[in-house]
């Protein structure tokens, strides 16, 4: 039985077997390959190695490393599929594997042309085509990795961030590398094409890495793959500089950098993590975490901040060309669009936040069954009404309603019929109440009505309380009907009989009435009103029970 892969690409020990340290073994072999490249390449004069033998070893080492990277990346695709990864997770590794397959094929042909045919592989069309295909596929893989890590991120925002970072990096590469090389005439256009494509590829990879770092912490695999691509581009830039200066020697430090890039790419294919491409948020909470997040969010703007001053500096020494001018204008336009998008997204987020706040407020202060105010909303409204009444000398009326016989409805007809009865009671209370009154369901079969302003004279409050009690009594005295009351079946008749027995006990009180009768002193508090209304409601309930018993 094979043990499941761990985060480093090795295997866990199963039933006492020793775990094979694949990651450590691979690291040793990779470092050994780079050291051997240094010895037979730049150090061949020290070990007195013939140039032909040295170049053969260098070419074969690069072939082995590139083929190993291609095979391991293809293996990573298979493992991701077997682990249940969806197309979004498999696509980056498939693009990496295809790019490395093209690179390894070009490297094999490079060695064949140089060692067997005896020609110049650097000008061979098929070899350069393989390198160009790899340079095109690797950035695609990084973009797919960004999308896999941020599936919910706006594609327009990601595109604009990529244009800002990539455009700034390309402009810097043109100013500092390509334009000087072409203007001096030290290299030909053909010699610039492949290094430039590698630079463009590295720019795209670095852009994707910057965008990913601004949104989350990239996984170790993605970091190693990005580092390998950047080292490869550095090798091509060094090649262009050496050719320009006339000091290029095959098998030198450019080959060493190529070997290092292949080792990094191979490591990225081996290192595993249990979830996805990204490794979570870029920073933790707290002041340091928010500062870190702010710095990472500004990474896509860093190349732009460097490129624009660089163009201005160049403009002080010579007339800037079409590429520099067009690049600066394009970057400025993209920056303006990015900021406009920020404004639009902020407004959208503010609107969504307000909608969510409104929903939460409704959930917090509304009864979900009847749509009436709940106990919290009623208490808050009563506190506010009592405070205003004490200042302006107004009266406040509170009425409590409790259904008698509600439990029998639930027991005989079911909870669905009980809920329908509560909704019907709520509708009748709302018909009785005025627009400024507050109707609430306090819980269960208990309801309350609040009159915020019941007049100024002492008897106004008492009259308003009596009037409200009478209106509520009339509204709730009409028998409630159940769906299917017109049917002749026994269940319909039983439901109708139970609903006919439902009545309401009502207790109503005004603040001015309590003060006028001397029951309480002015000003009357909300708690005192609630206690008195509750007391009167239960007094009415006892009278109802006594009347039925008699």
Image (cartoon, rainbow, N blue to C red):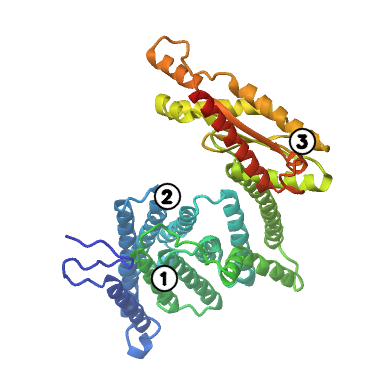
Q: Which mark is residue 455?
A: none
Q: CA distance from mark 2 to mark 1?
A: 26 Å
Please state if 341 lies on the left or on the right of 5 as rendered. right
| Residue that numbered label 3 is attached to | 461
* Secondary structure type for disc 1: helix
Using the rendered image of the protein, determine whether residue 447 is visible from the camera's viewpoint. no
Q: Is residue 276 above or below residue 283?
A: above
In-image side of 357 versus 217 (left or right): right
Label 1 neighbour load within 10 Å: few <14, some 14-19, many 20+? many
Residue 402's x, y, as percent? Answer: 56, 33
Mark 2 residue element: helix
Closer to the camera: disc 3 or disc 2?
Answer: 3
Q: Quadrant of residue 313?
A: bottom right
Q: Nearer the viewer, residue 172 or 27?
A: 27
The tag on residue 88 is: 2
Marks 3, 1: nearer the viewer:
3
Q: Secondary structure at mark 3?
A: helix
Determine crowd level at label 2: few under 14, some 14-19, many 20+ residues with C-alpha closer than 10 A. some
Q: Earlier in the sequence, mark 2 or mark 1?
A: 2
Residue 207 in the image, given as x and y percentages of width and height:
55, 62
Disc 1 target residue: 261
Most foreground residue, 103 or 481: 481
Residue 543 lies in quadrant: top right
Q: Residue furthest front?
A: 550
């Amino acid at each position: 039985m094979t043990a499941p892969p761990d985060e480093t690409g090795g295997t866990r020990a199963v039933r006492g077997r020793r775990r094979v340290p694949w990651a450590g073994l691979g690291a040793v072999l990779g470092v050994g390959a780079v050291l051997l490249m240094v010895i037979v390449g730049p150090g061949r004069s020290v070990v007195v190695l013939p140039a032909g033998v040295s170049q053969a070893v260098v070419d074969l080492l690069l072939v082995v490393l590139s083929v190993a990277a291609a095979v391991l990346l293809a293996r990573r695709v298979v493992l991701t599929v077997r682990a249940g990864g969806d197309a979004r997770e498999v696509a980056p590794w498939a693009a990496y594997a295809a790019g490395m397959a093209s690179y390894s094929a070009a490297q094999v042909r490079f060695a064949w042309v140089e060692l067997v045919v005896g020609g110049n592989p650097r000008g061979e069309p098929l070899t350069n085509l393989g390198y160009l295909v790899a340079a095109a596929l690797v950035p695609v893989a990084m973009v797919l990795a960004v999308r896999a890590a941020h599936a919910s991120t706006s594609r327009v925002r990601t595109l604009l961030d990529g244009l800002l970072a990539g455009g700034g990096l390309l402009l810097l590469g043109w100013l500092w590398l390509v334009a000087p090389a072409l203007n001096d005439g030290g290299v030909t256009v053909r010699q610039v094409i492949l290094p430039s494509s590698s630079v463009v590829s590295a720019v795209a990879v670095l852009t994707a890495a910057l965008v990913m770092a601004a949104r989350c912490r990239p996984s170790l695999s993605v970091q190693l793959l990005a580092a390998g691509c950047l080292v490869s581009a550095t090798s091509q830039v060094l090649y262009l500089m050496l050719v320009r200066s006339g000091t290029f020697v095959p098998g030198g430090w450019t080959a060493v950098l190529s070997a290092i890039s292949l080792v990094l790419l191979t490591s990225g294919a081996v290192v595993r993590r249990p979830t996805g491409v990204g490794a979570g948020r870029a920073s933790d909470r707290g002041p340091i975490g928010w500062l870190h997040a702010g710095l990472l969010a500004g990474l896509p703007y860093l190349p732009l901040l460097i490129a624009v001053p660089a163009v201005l500096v160049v403009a002080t020494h010579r007339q800037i060309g079409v590429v520099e001018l067009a690049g600066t204008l394009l970057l400025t336009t993209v920056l303006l669009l990015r900021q406009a998008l920020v404004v639009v997204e902020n407004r959208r987020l503010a609107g969504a936040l307000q909608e969510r706040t409104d929903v939460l407020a409704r959930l917090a202060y509304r009864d979900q069954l009847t749509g009436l105010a709940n106990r919290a909303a009623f208490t808050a409204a009563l506190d506010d009404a009592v405070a205003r009444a004490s200042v302006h000398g107004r009266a406040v009326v509170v009425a409590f309603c409790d259904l008698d016989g509600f439990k029998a409805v639930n027991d005989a007809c079911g909870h669905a019929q009980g809920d329908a009865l509560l909704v019907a009671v709520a509708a009748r209370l709302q018909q009785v109440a005025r627009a400024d009154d507050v109707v609430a369901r306090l819980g269960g079969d208990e309801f309350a009505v609040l009159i915020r302003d019941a007049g100024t004279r002492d008897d106004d409050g008492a009259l308003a309380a009596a009037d409200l009690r009478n209106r509520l009594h009339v509204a709730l005295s009409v028998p409630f009907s159940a769906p299917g009351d017109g049917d002749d079946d026994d269940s319909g008749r039983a439901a109708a009989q139970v609903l006919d027995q439902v009545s309401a006990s009502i207790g109503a009180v005004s603040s001015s009435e309590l003060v006028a009768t001397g029951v309480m002193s002015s000003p009357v508090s909300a708690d005192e009103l609630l206690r008195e209304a509750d007391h009167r409601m239960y007094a009415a309930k006892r009278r109802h029970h006594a009347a039925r018993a008699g």
